[in-house]
Image: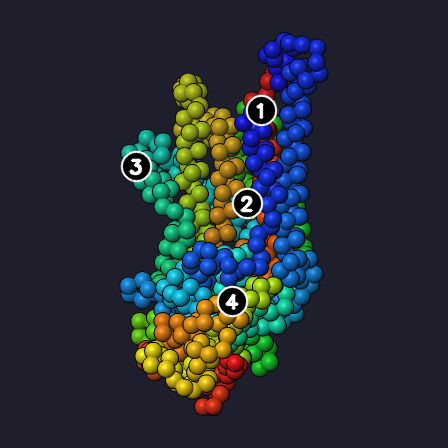
């Protein structure tokens, strides 16, 4: 608030002082909001009471007693509680969101860059892609991919089989499940140590580059370290990781890990749809970088991909990140459309099935809203932090 | 100035009493239409025909209540609800009556603020499979995947049944019965489980109904009936006695076609039912010809049954338990007197 903008006070009265009045209005507005919130809550509880609807969160301890097609943690339909259902729904939502965000980001970046490519075919194809998938409602796309996935895949008995360990059918993609025996701990240690090693290597290489200008093949060396050291430890410790292969028994496969078609369809739809918006953000970001930057880099003799990676994208990110935050939030929230194809995420399981089985709408909807609110706030905090890091530092 | 006006308006609206709880009858009469919650499309119970007109056994109940209250069976606004939407819609007052293949269970009756007004169809949960699967009994379904509608009692019974028989299963749960049967059609699951009556209906939606069979096992009791909000006894009575009136009419042989002639009947039971004697209608807060209107506009229970799910319908479901008490079934009207 700019104090010099306020008009001179016209009298000596307390209320005639514009500053006091501004504060009074705000306080009144706040009181009004509090009153409304109180009134609505009170009204709700009164109505609920009057209709004899049970309230409270004690239902969370009751046995749920229904089956769930995909659970990341242990779940038994005969003993697990509604609280477990809540956790499973939450984890499944997070699973879809994380995978979706990664895919959408990679795809969005590629298409966004492709859109500005000098290659006519690439840029036109990117344009067609963006315009097509951005303009079709996400729900239709989810249903489309689900039906395509289901219609094109064979029944379990006629599965596509790869090396007798991967199977693809209309019940999902089946892969062997790793079994960790004693000694597998060493392998995890090796993985963690190599990640730490690569981290320090990267810092050393950057420093050396800053000082001497010499390039170090950091990517190739890192990959070598990350792959070779765990593999080495694996053989040294006597191959402690086995696998359980899926086997056809009766109607369905047993054993192994099943990636259900609902998950595949949902990730397909969400990442393809969200990528179009990210691509446009990327394009806007790149176009916002002054052409002089590119020309200057070119005159230094840098190759095109180096210019993109080291000159253009770091500057473009400042423009790209804020709209991309929104797209990540949208993706998380759109994942609730899964209810149309029966993917067991939070809305389907908790504010769908659970709500209907126990009927406690208010508690369940409040919990569901709290979850989405929390996820959204976390995403936005993290990305705003990244954005602040990327911002031009004043000197 | 504007702000004070808005504040005043909101302040006044805050003083207005809460959402009306009692008085559904007055409200329906004032609106002139009955808001009836039905399914999103279960053949035989509530589904639209090729002209977009709602038809079915549950729809007939809506029509019967509208006839009794408003004297016109067509003054019904149908609100299609999925299984998981139905109770909230009723609790919040979006519908006046829920007539949607809903199983009467203890939890629903006691903890949701709802009342079941009776049973208009005695059902049981069954299984629908393709003949190709080569299964003739539900006991052979160990390890099978089921398509099922979310938030139904079927979902819970399935767990109980497989637990009791030490078998395993996988469930894919969909929002609507249409999606459920679609999943089955496309081979996402080996079997559909739902109330047997619905399975016969859903079977008609298959490209080749004869390629599927409903297994003989019935694994649960599913008494289906209309539901109203708790705490409005007058309305509860109306729905309850509308259902009884359709049963009583069948028992007394009063049909859509002979109801006018029956007005002159000397049978005291018929006279009480059709309002030519007694005060059944007035006691319900309705006109004395309430039951006459029901039978005239909609027909008796037997007629509805035959037309929508029974022998005159594509479903051809046997009356079985749904026959009248004096013909070997469970349907029994409390005496109208």
Are the residues at dot 3 and dot 4 in contact (C-beta closer than 8 Å)?
A: no
Q: Which residue is mark 2?
A: A224
Residue at (50%, 52%) from the top-left corner? Answer: A336
Q: Which residue is mark 4?
A: B285
Specify whether disc 3 shares its chain with disc 1.
Answer: yes
Give the numbered dot on residue A124: 3
In this rendering, the label closer to the viewer, 2 or 3: 3
Q: What whole-number distance in Å separates the C-alpha atoms at marks 2 and 3?
A: 37 Å
| As drawn, B68 above or below A130 | below
Mark 3 packing: few (<14 Cα in 10 Å), some, or many (20+)? some
Quarter of the figure that contains the N terminus of chain B: top right
> Percent position (x, y) of residue A172?
45, 63
- Chain of the residue on which disc 1 is drawn: A
Give SS at disc 2: helix
Marks 4 and 1: in contact by CB < 8 Å?
A: no
In the image, is A349 to the left or to the right of B249?
right
Disc nearer the start of the sequence (2/3): 3
Q: Secondary structure at mark 1?
A: helix
> Percent position (x, y) of residue A9?
65, 10
Q: Which residue is mark 1?
A: A210
SS state under label 3: helix
Spatial CA distance of label 1 from label 2 is 24 Å
Front residue of B307 and A307? B307
The one of A54 and B33 positioned closer to us in this rendering: B33
Q: Residues within 10 Å of mark 1 (few under 14, many from 20)?
A: few
Q: Is residue A393 visible?
A: yes
For mark 4, give the secondary structure.
Answer: loop
Q: Is residue A99 visible?
A: no
């Amino acid at each position: 608030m700019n104090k010099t903008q306020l008009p001179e006070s016209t009298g000596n009265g307390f209320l005639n002082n514009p500053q006091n009045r501004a504060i009074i209005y705000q306080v009144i507005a706040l009181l009004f909001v509090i009153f409304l919130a109180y009134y609505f809550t009170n009204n709700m509880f009164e109505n609920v009471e009057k209709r004899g609807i049970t309230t409270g969160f004690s239902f969370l301890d009751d046995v749920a007693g229904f089956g769930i097609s995909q659970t990341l943690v242990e779940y038994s339909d005969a003993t697990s509680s509604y609280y477990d259902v809540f956790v499973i729904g939450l984890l499944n939502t997070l699973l879809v969101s994380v995978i979706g965000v990664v895919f959408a980001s990679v795809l969005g970046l590629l298409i966004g860059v492709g859109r500005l490519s000098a290659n006519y075919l690439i840029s036109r194809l990117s344009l067609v892609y963006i315009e097509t998938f951005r303009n079709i409602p996400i729900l239709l796309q989810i249903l489309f991919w689900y039906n395509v996935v289901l219609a094109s895949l064979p029944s379990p008995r006629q599965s596509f089989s790869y090396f007798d360990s991967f199977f693809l059918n209309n019940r999902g993609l089946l892969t062997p499940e790793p079994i960790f025996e004693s000694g597998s701990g060493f392998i995890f240690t090796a993985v963690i140590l190599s990640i730490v090693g690569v981290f320090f290597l990267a810092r050393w290489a950057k420093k050396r580059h800053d000082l001497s200008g010499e390039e170090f093949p950091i990517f190739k060396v890192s990959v070598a370290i990350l792959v070779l050291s765990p593999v080495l430890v694996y053989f040294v410790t006597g191959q402690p990781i086995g696998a359980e292969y899926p086997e056809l028994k009766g109607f369905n496969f047993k054993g192994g890990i099943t990636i259900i078609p609902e998950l595949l369809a949902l990730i397909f739809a969400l990442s393809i749809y969200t990528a179009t918006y990210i691509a446009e953000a990327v394009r806007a970001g790149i176009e916002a970088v002054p052409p002089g930057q590119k020309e200057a880099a070119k005159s230094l003799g840098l190759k095109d991909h180096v210019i993109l990676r080291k000159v253009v994208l770091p500057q473009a990110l400042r423009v790209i990140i804020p709209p991309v935050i929104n797209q990540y939030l949208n993706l998380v929230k759109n994942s609730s459309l899964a209810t149309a194809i029966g993917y067991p995420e939070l809305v389907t399981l908790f504010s769908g099935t659970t709500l209907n089985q126990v009927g406690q709408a208010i508690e369940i909807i409040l919990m569901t809203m709290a979850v989405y609110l929390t996820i959204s706030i976390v995403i936005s905090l993290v990305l705003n932090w990244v954005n602040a890091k990327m911002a031009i530092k004043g000197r | 100035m504007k702000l004070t006006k808005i504040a005043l308006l909101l302040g006044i609206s805050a003083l207005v009493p809460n959402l009306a709880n009692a008085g559904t009858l007055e409200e329906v009469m004032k609106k002139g239409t009955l808001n009836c919650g039905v399914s999103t499309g279960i053949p035989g119970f509530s589904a639209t025909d090729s002209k977009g007109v709602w038809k079915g056994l549950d729809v007939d109940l809506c029509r019967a209540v509208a006839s009794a209250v408003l004297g016109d069976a067509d003054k019904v606004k149908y609100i299609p609800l999925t299984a998981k939407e139905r109770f909230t819609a009723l609790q919040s007052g979006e519908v006046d009556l829920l007539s949607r293949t809903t199983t009467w269970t203890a939890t629903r009756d006691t903890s949701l603020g709802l009342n079941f007004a009776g049973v208009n169809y005695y059902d049981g949960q069954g299984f629908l499979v393709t003949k190709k699967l080569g299964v003739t009994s539900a006991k052979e379904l160990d390890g099978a995947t089921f398509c099922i509608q979310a938030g139904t009692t079927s979902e819970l019974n399935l767990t109980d049944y497989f637990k009791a028989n030490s078998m395993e299963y996988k469930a894919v749960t969909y929002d609507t019965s249409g999606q459920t049967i679609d999943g089955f059609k496309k081979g996402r699951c080996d079997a559909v489980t739902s109330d047997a009556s619905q399975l016969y209906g859903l079977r008609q939606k298959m490209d080749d109904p004869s390629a599927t069979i409903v297994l003989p096992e019935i694994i649960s009791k599913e008494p289906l009936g209309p539901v109203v909000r708790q705490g409005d006894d007058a309305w509860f009575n109306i729905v309850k006695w509308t259902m009884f009136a359709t049963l009583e009419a069948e028992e007394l042989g009063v049909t859509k076609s002979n109801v006018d002639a029956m007005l002159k009947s000397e049978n005291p039971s018929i006279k009480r039912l059709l309002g030519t004697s007694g005060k059944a209608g007035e006691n319900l807060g309705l006109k004395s010809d309430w039951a006459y209107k029901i039978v005239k506009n909609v027909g008796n229970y037997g007629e509805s049954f035959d037309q929508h799910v029974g022998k005159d319908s594509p479903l051809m479901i046997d009356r079985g338990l749904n026959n009248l008490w004096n013909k070997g079934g469970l349907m029994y009207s409390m005496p109208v007197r």
